[in-house]
Image (cartoon, coloured by chain):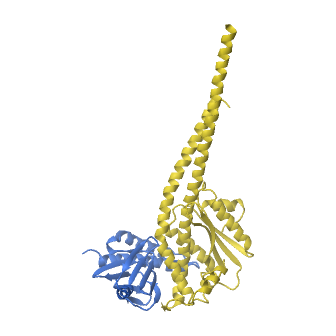
Amino acid sequence: MSLQDMKRQIQSVDNTAKMTGAMQTISAVKLSRARERLDRIRPYTDNMQQMMQDIASRAGGDNPLLAGREEVRNVAVCTITSDRGLAGPFNAQVLRRTMQFRQEQDVDIVQVVTGRKAVEFFRFGRISLEEAFTGFSDEPSFEKAQEIGRHLTQLFEDEEADEVHLVYNQFQSALVQRATVTRLLPAAPEDTDEEEDEEDGEEEGRGAPFEFIPDAEVILERLVPKYVETLIFRALFESAAGEHGSRMSAMKSATDAAHEMSEDLKQQMNKARQAAITQEIIEIAAAAEALG
Amino acid sequence: MSEDQNQQEGRQLFCRVITPEKMIYDGEADLVVVRIADGDIGVMRDHAPVVSTVEPREVRITQDDERYVFATSDGFFKVSENLVQILVEEAVPPDEIDVEEAESRVEQAENELSEVSDDEDAERQRTEIERRRQVAENLVRVARDYGEG
């Protein structure tokens, strides 16, 4: 490689580092904004879940939205991904979790997605999508969550799906996002082994019994769809924060790698340059000696 | 502070008005009046536990001679252990209501209502649009009833 070529390559690596560095900074800003919003929506989502539990523990035993149907023939899965890439393993891990979940089911699957990355993934895998919502992954809104929630609740009510699950990246920190599966419908708390263990230690029917006005069924009819929307709302925000966090650390690795590569190249170039100079001096010295 | 006083303080009623965007009100309250499923309910301390739905009206909170009013969308209501929780999608104080915007929302909903085609989903769509119309109309009403002047 000539010195010219090396110079050009260093230039190009430095440019890449500049770009990834800028993307890292932008992602950091977006991450802190997303975290702030995540904190702001938490009171609403937490209280909505609490209210759901209050009612579910005392009523609604035969409401399908809450208790489910006896026979499960179809399961709907909604996978939340980002619209844009360059976010490290962010999308791959949630898609892998989705495929794993799909394999665990022995019934038909209705696949719904949000984010362009999931659309590309399933198109490539020739898996048909029932519906795709795209174009808002890095700045979700409550309206979008409502739209998705309504669609999923409708699938359940029309008996196109007897269960609805959500797969998304749960935000744990800027560096850690965990691909998680949550059941949206039926909305009764899932009796996993873990929860049963917890319940053993707790007393039944804690707190005073509520008076439901007009009655629990009517409240449930309205609460369950809102509850589904709320869970989606939170998942969209956790996913958005995770997307920015993941992209930030992916870009940081890229920037670091580029700097390292640039340093290596510079050293190589200096060596080559010095070798060339030495060569020239030797040639001149040899020529002078021959003339002398 | 003596234990007695502590207990007394524990008996104070608290109220939270929460929307997906933020906590609109979070503090003590002497009296909270909300329109729930069967009409207005007035909550003072030591109220029996109730869960209900909230209708698109106004929430009125009285605390130390101060009155706070919020126009709300529909939502959910819970009172338990001296804590009132009102979960709504929108809650706006009267002087922050954008009347023009609310009126255009009413108009838009009315247009949409007339355009609902008669398929099997029509009933559900009508209910949803009607709900939006009521929420927007309520904003206009509260701005008029409680606004300045």
Examine the rendering and report whether any part of residue A71 can be seen. Answer: yes
The residue lying toward the viewer, choosing from A163 and B108, is A163
The residue lying toward the viewer, choosing from B91 and B130, is B91
Q: Is residue B72 left or right of residue A193?
A: left
The residue lying toward the viewer, choosing from A106 and A172, is A172
Say which residue appears at 54% left-offset and 44% top-offset. Answer: A18
Examine the rendering and report whether any part of residue B141 can be seen. Answer: no
Provide residue B115's location: percent of width, then percent of height: 50, 73
Provide residue A269's location: percent of width, then percent of height: 63, 32
Which chain is drawn using yellow? A
Rendered view: A30 above or below B53: above
Q: Where, by quadrant of the figure, is residue A249 drawn?
A: bottom right
**Outermost residue to the left:** B149
Please give the count of numbered marks on the rendered protein: 0
**Outermost residue to the top:** A292
Q: Where, by quadrant of the figure, is residue B58 drawn?
A: bottom left
Q: Where, by quadrant of the figure, is residue B146 drawn?
A: bottom left
Provide residue A64's location: percent of width, then percent of height: 62, 85
Say which residue appears at 52% left-offset and 81% top-offset. Answer: A50
Rendered view: A211 above or below B83: below
**Outermost residue to the front:** B2
Q: Is residue A207 left or right of residue A184?
A: left
Provide residue A150's location: percent of width, then percent of height: 56, 75
- Quadrant of image for the N terminus of chain B: bottom left
Say which residue appears at 57% left-offset and 66% top-offset. Answer: A172
- Quadrant of image for the C terminus of chain B: bottom left
Which chain is drawn using blue? B
